[in-house]
């Protein structure tokens, strides 16, 4: 921990009030940004996407679960993998608590990955998550929303991700997409964000930002690669080991943290 200046309570209050003014500026800026986000134009979905779910095949419309709004986490778990991306897992750890409230505010949440459903379910149960998670294997869904890439895409060395061409060797990358369904059943794509764009939904980061050490990402990568593990792999957990010790884990975290 870095040494800090020590002052009187009165001096601390003065410094705190100065920071408070900046915090209020950020709050008002966030409110304006959220309003701009809600004002974005929508795009109608005219493709019939289907997914493998625990209860059988489901359409994109089925994923709404009777609600009018749907948040999708594009979770990095490819068909040839058995463990989800550590960064996506870190984000997913925050879903269940929020979901208990979202469902009462006309919002559904679903994670989507290309891995087979049996792989998804095994990992979901291992991690103790309750949220719905479906497989898009065999569907264009991930590719159409620019979070999965073909061999030809990767052979070019650059992929279209986060609204620009960027270097990547990963077959899947993280993100969130939002959809709305009107009374007639028409589905619209309203928003997508990638990389660090939805970092605000990660409550652990928001707590860390309140502390003296902050995120303390001062290792070789200067991002979540320096410390984030799947929650059952931290030291002290049974069977724990370093999730970032293999090349795949490192690449997943590095890519997710850099956009």
Image (cartoon, grey):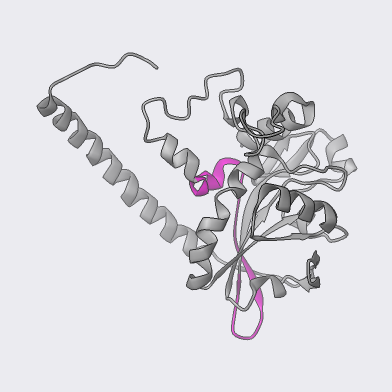
- Where is the C terminus found, in terms of image quarters? top right
Q: Along the horizontal axis of the image, is 105 left or right of 49?
A: left
Magenta span: 180-202
* Image coordinates for residue 144, horizontal then vertical, percent: 76, 57
The quarter in which the N terminus is drawn is: top left
Front-most of residues 141 and 80 = 80
Judge whether residue 146 can be spotted in this image. no
Q: How many discs appear? A: 0
Asked whether, in this view, residue 210 is left or right of residue 43, the answer is left
For image coordinates 52% across by 20% down, the residue present is 218
Query: In this rendering, does residue 56 appear at all?
Result: yes
Name the residue furthest left.
10
Toward the front, the furthest residue is 238
Which residue sits at x=57%, y=54%?
95
Residue 191: image quadrant is bottom right
Q: Residue furthest top?
A: 3
Residue 181 included in the magenta stretch of the image: yes
Q: Position of residue 226 (x, y in %)?
A: 60, 25
Residue 39 to residue 213: above or below = below
The quarter of the displayed image where residue 152 is located: top right
Asked if the stretch drawn in magenta spans residue 42, the answer is no
Residue 101 locus on image (x, y percent): 48, 65
Q: Residue at x 33, y 49 (%)?
A: 27
The vertical placement of 40 against 169, above or below, is below
Percent x, y of residue 128: 65, 51
Choose between 220 and 133: the one closer to the eye.
133
């Amino acid at each position: 921990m870095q040494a800090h200046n020590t002052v009187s309570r009165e001096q601390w209050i003065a410094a705190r009030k100065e920071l408070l003014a900046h915090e209020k500026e950020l709050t008002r800026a966030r409110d304006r940004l959220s309003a701009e986000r809600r004002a974005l134009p929508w795009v109608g979905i005219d493709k019939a996407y289907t997914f493998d779910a625990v209860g059988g095949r489901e359409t994109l419309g089925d994923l709404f679960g009777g609600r009018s709004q749907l948040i999708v986490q594009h979770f990095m778990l490819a068909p040839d993998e058995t463990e989800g991306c550590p960064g996506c897992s870190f984000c997913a750890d925050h879903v269940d608590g929020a979901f208990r409230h979202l469902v009462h505010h006309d919002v559904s949440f679903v994670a989507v990955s290309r891995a087979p459903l049996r792989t998804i379910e095994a990992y979901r149960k291992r991690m103790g998550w309750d949220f719905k998670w479906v497989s898009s294997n065999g569907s264009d869904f991930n590719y159409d929303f620019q979070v999965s890439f073909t061999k030809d895409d990767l052979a070019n060395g650059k992929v279209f991700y986060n609204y620009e061409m960027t270097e990547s060797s990963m077959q899947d990358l993280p993100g969130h997409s939002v959809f709305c369904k009107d009374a007639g059943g028409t589905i619209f794509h309203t928003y997508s964000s990638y990389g660090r764009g939805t970092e605000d939904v990660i409550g652990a980061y928001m707590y860390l930002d309140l502390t003296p050490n902050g995120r303390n990402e001062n290792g070789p990568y200067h991002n979540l690669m320096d410390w984030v593990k799947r929650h059952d792999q931290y030291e002290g957990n049974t069977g724990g080991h370093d999730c970032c010790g293999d090349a795949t884990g490192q690449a997943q975290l590095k890519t997710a943290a850099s956009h």
